[in-house]
Amino acid sequence: MERQKKEKVVQELGSKLRELKYLFLAEYSGMTVAQITRLRRELRNVDTEFTVIKNSLLKIASKGTKAEALQDKFDGPNAIISIYKDPTGAARVVAGIAKEVPSLKLKAGYLDGLVITAEDILRLATIPSREVLLAKLVGILKGQPARLVYALSGNINKLMLVLNSIKNQKEQQA
């Protein structure tokens, strides 16, 4: 690659790395073109990109970005998995394909200011998506007022029964 192209690639990758909140680093050696194409297609469905980049260019582009924290993992054939929305969706896709294709190995990741390990990424794959978690929260919040009304009405009913009983006793005594 000629120098101007390399500089352009470094500049584009550097600006992309500055914008990202989440990224994973993976080793892809041993994967076939068909497997990489399938991985890219499935990742695109969850607003994620799979980019193969030379380590020397990656080291230069990552300076001053979040990816700089992962520089000790920049050895061997690397790919950056750039996540634009939901990191759990991307983790599920990568974990699923990694089970089928053992040559895809997760190395590390960057998640909201934290460097995470491959094991953390696999654990992240088991977490439900943001939409599912929000739906569960809404369900819980929706049920709480009904429970409160039921609990409060039960106490009022018991109070009314006690007062009625006292009233009946007073009437019988009079």
Image (cartoon, grey):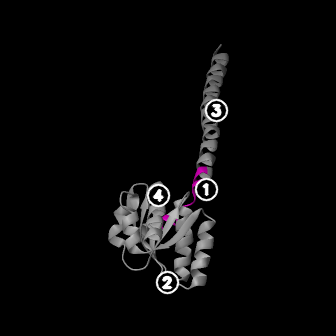
Of label 3 and label 1, which has the lower sequence position? 1
Of label 4 and label 3, which has the lower sequence position? 4
The residue lying at 56 percent from left, 64 percent from top is 48
Q: Which residues are magenta?
A: 123-134
Q: Secondary structure at mark 2?
A: loop
Judged from this view, the residue extending furthest toward the left is 72
Residue 125, how many percent across, how many down? 52, 67
Q: Within 10 angstroms of label 2, few (less than 14), some, or many (20 or more) residues?
A: few
Please tell me whether residue 134 is drawn above or below residue 8 in the rendered image: above
Where, quadrant-wise, is the C terminus in this rendering? Answer: top right
Marks 2 and 3 in Cβ contact (< 8 Å): no
Of label 1 and label 4, which has the lower sequence position? 4
Label of residue 132 in the image: 1
Residue 63 among those drawn in magenta: no
For the residues labelled 4 and 3, the Cα–Cα distance comes to: 60 Å
The residue lying at 64 percent from left, 32 percent from top is 153
Disc 3 or disc 1, which is closer to the eye? 1
Q: Amino acid at mark 2?
A: Pro
For the residues labelled 2 and 4, the Cα–Cα distance comes to: 31 Å
Please tell me whether residue 8 is drawn above or below residue 107 in the rendered image: above
Disc 2 or disc 4, which is closer to the eye? 4
Residue 122 visible? The answer is no
Q: Which residue is mark 4?
A: 15
Q: Is residue 171 left or right of residue 9?
A: right
Residue 154, how many percent across, how many down? 62, 34
Q: Amino acid at mark 3?
A: Ser
Q: Which residue is mark 3?
A: 153
